Amino acid sequence: MTMAGNLRKVTGLGRTGGLRKVARLARRRPRVDLSHPARSPLGSSVVNCVTYRDGVRTPEGGDPVRLVEHMRGRGDGFVWLGLHEPTDQEFAGVAELFDLHPLAVEDAIEAHQRPKVERYGETLFAVFKTVCYVEHEQLTTTSEVVSTGEIMVFVGRDFVITVRHGRHGSLGPLREGLESDPVQLAKGPSAVLHAIADQVVDEFLSVIEAFQADIDHVETEVFAEHGARVDPGRIYQLKRELLELRRAVVPLGRPLEELATRPVRVVKPEIQAYFRDVADHLLRATEQIAAFDELLNWILQAHLARVTVAQNEDMRKITAWAAIVAVPTMVCGVYGMNFDHMPELRWRYGYGLVIGVIAVACLTLHRGFRRNGWL
């Protein structure tokens, strides 16, 4: 029997007696590995529930409520419960079991929160925005470049509860990485909180690196020979997607600063140094996003300038050809007047002379315009 299997029913009930009854029924279910799926294959929001003692994963089994109470009584380990997009009913039992604040529970269920860190008594509640780069063959005016999700983390003295929203940002590989480092995991729930923050910021840097490739591609097209023909909507689309990335990255600066500098009961002092390192990485991501925004503004201005230059060149060509065409138009217009007495009307070589004058005048104008770069 797995503890994760028991907790699938815990999330659906709010009373301890019902929890224990469902836990006994859940023993009949086969063992299922729930480390990586986005949602449990058994239809619940519980992804995994594991206990740790001295940085080592303990054997799963038993009544989850008694196991949590026993773990809390011993004071030498903690529980890590992972959920994915739980409903009110699914989260009610968890909130009662771990005595979570209603406001934090509401934020965890509804999602769409800004990155933040809040304290509710002995519990720390943190919100992280996760980002994912959306692969695309060609950037268009409607291409989605950045997809966002959320991870909410409840941290107590002896428990960590992660609530994930979105199709990306799986914590399964993160859990395996922590389990391979018992020394770090033995530092308690605050070590898990740091690992989550570090993974989120690393994803920011990965998305920024992929984002730069799109910007470089657009920049190359704008400054190419036919750059004036580039659709400016693609540049605006990159700016919109960059704004979405900024909303996930920039607000996280202040919460990380608080975790790195201010004393928090559930965050051990030796972990705060790790948060300072994460804050430094976040600062680099923030500066890169600001640089991208400025670069896109310059690319857009350069594109508009190239369009203006191309239009000026077209107008100069039109003006030059209009001037050349004006010579035969003027001559033909003069000799098209119905007067009986005009010079060279009866002259045998008059036609040839007029055509020659027109040709010489047009060639002279054409050569002058070519020399000045108008044609």
Image (cartoon, rainbow, N blue to C red):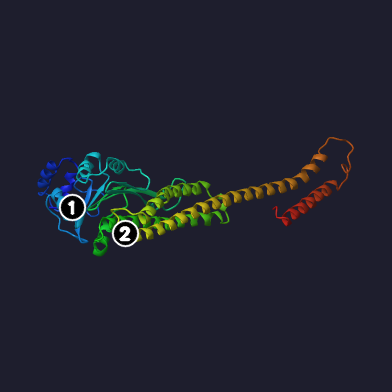
- List x then y, in percent, for residue 255: 37, 51
Which amino acid does the dot numbered 2 rest on?
Answer: Pro
| Residue that mark 1 sits on | 72
- List x then y, in percent, for residue 169: 32, 52
Residue in the picture at 21% in, 52% down: 48
Residue in the picture at 12% in, 42% down: 17
Callouts 1 and 2 close, C-beta under 8 Å: no
Which amino acid does the dot numbered 1 rest on?
Answer: Arg
- List x then y, in percent, for residue 121: 28, 46
* Label 1 crowd (10 A; few <14 / some 14-19 / many >=20): some
- List x then y, in percent, for residue 317: 68, 49
Question: Residue 269 got which mark?
Answer: 2
Q: Could you tell me which secondary element the residue under label 2 belongs to?
A: helix
Residue in the picture at 40% in, 49% down: 248
Q: In this view, does 247 lie to the left or right of 218?
A: left
- In this figure, what is the number of numbered marks? 2
Q: Nearer the viewer, residue 83 or 212?
A: 83
Mark 1 vs mark 2, CA separation in Å:
22 Å
